[in-house]
Amino acid sequence: MRSTLRQDLRAALRAGDRTAVAALRSAIAAIDNAQAPFVDDADRSGPARPGGVGVGSTEIDRLELDENELRSVLRAERDESLTAAAQFDALGRPDAAAAMRARAEVVARYLD
């Protein structure tokens, strides 16, 4: 799914589809954040990998998300956009609300 999102982002960039670009960038960032490993604050002295010094020694493997977890992240992104749209409606900003609904629709395509 992640590779599909990235391919679709490239296509949206080429097509100049600002709504899709914004929605896909946000979705990819949310997935990246969900894959970030928990780092214990207790031990931050030294390299992340045992015996590691030099290039890559501070890199930590990302968490692997299964299909259900990825869908959950995307569902949360869609819901966040819809919530923002409702808030914009309440503020009398129908243009911004419509933009957020359009972003939610882009993300919703990946939930089917």
Image (cartoon, helix red, strand yellow):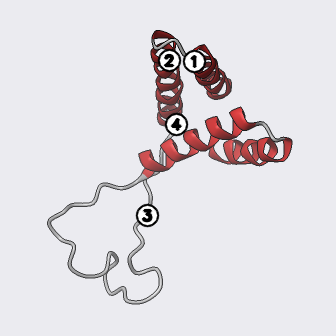
Q: What number is the disc on residue 61?
A: 3
Q: What number is the disc on residue 70?
A: 4
Read off the residue under disc 1: 97
Mark 2 burial class by Cα count in 10 Å: few <14, some 14-19, many 20+: some
Give left or right: position of 73 versus 18.
Answer: left
User: Is label 2 in contact with label 4 (beta carbons under 8 Å)?
Assistant: no
The span from disc 2 to disc 4 (Cα, nearest Å) is 27 Å
In the image, 68 versus 22, the foreground residue is 22
Residue appearing at x 67%, y 27% in the figure = 106
Read off the residue under disc 2: 88
Under mark 2, the amino acid is Phe
Q: Residue furthest right?
A: 15
Residue appearing at x 72%, y 44% in the figure = 9
Q: Quadrant of the image for the N terminus? A: top right
User: Is label 2 in contact with label 3 (beta carbons under 8 Å)?
Assistant: no
- Foreground tag (1 vs 4): 1
